[in-house]
Image (cartoon, rainbow, N blue to C red):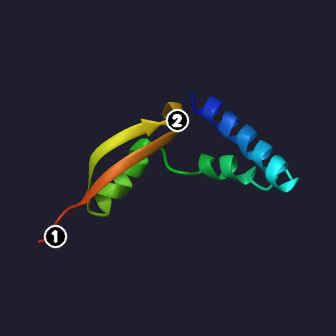
Amino acid sequence: MQLVQSGLLGFWGRFCGLVLHGNSEVHGYIAESLRSYPNVDELGDYFRQAGFKIVRREKLLFGMLELTLLEKLKTK
């Protein structure tokens, strides 16, 4: 599924760059940079290590985007 999402994002990024700027590479970097972004589990670990609790996660755009609501835990 991630491969399909990455391909779609690459396509739309290049398409928007071509239509809006006349250069398909303007937004083409976005899909590539997201490949190095942590996955959902790793990102959750980072949040917890930073002192946050995940309150809710909501997938949007057919799972291509996730909205995460966090709560900062009180420190003693």
**Quadrant of the drawing holding the N terminus:** top right
Q: Which mark is residue 52?
A: none
Q: Residues within 10 Å of mark 2 (few under 14, many from 20)?
A: few
Q: Which mark is residue 61?
A: 2
Closest to the observer, 30 or 16: 16
Residue that protrudes farthest toward the bottom in the picture: 76
| C-alpha separation, residue under disc 1 versus residue under disc 2 | 35 Å
Ranked by sequence position, the earlier of labels 1 and 2 is: 2
Residue tagged 1: 75
Residue that protrudes farthest toward the front in the picture: 20
As drawn, 52 above or below 10 = below
Secondary element at tag 2: helix
As drawn, 20 above or below 61 = below
Q: Quadrant of residue 21?
A: bottom right
Q: Position of residue 71 (x, y in %)?
A: 25, 57
Secondary element at tag 1: loop
What amino acid is labelled 1 in the image? Thr
68 sits to left or right of 17: left
Residue at horizontal 61 percent and vertical 46 percent from the top: 35
1 or 2: mark nearer the eye: 2
24 sits to left or right of 45: right
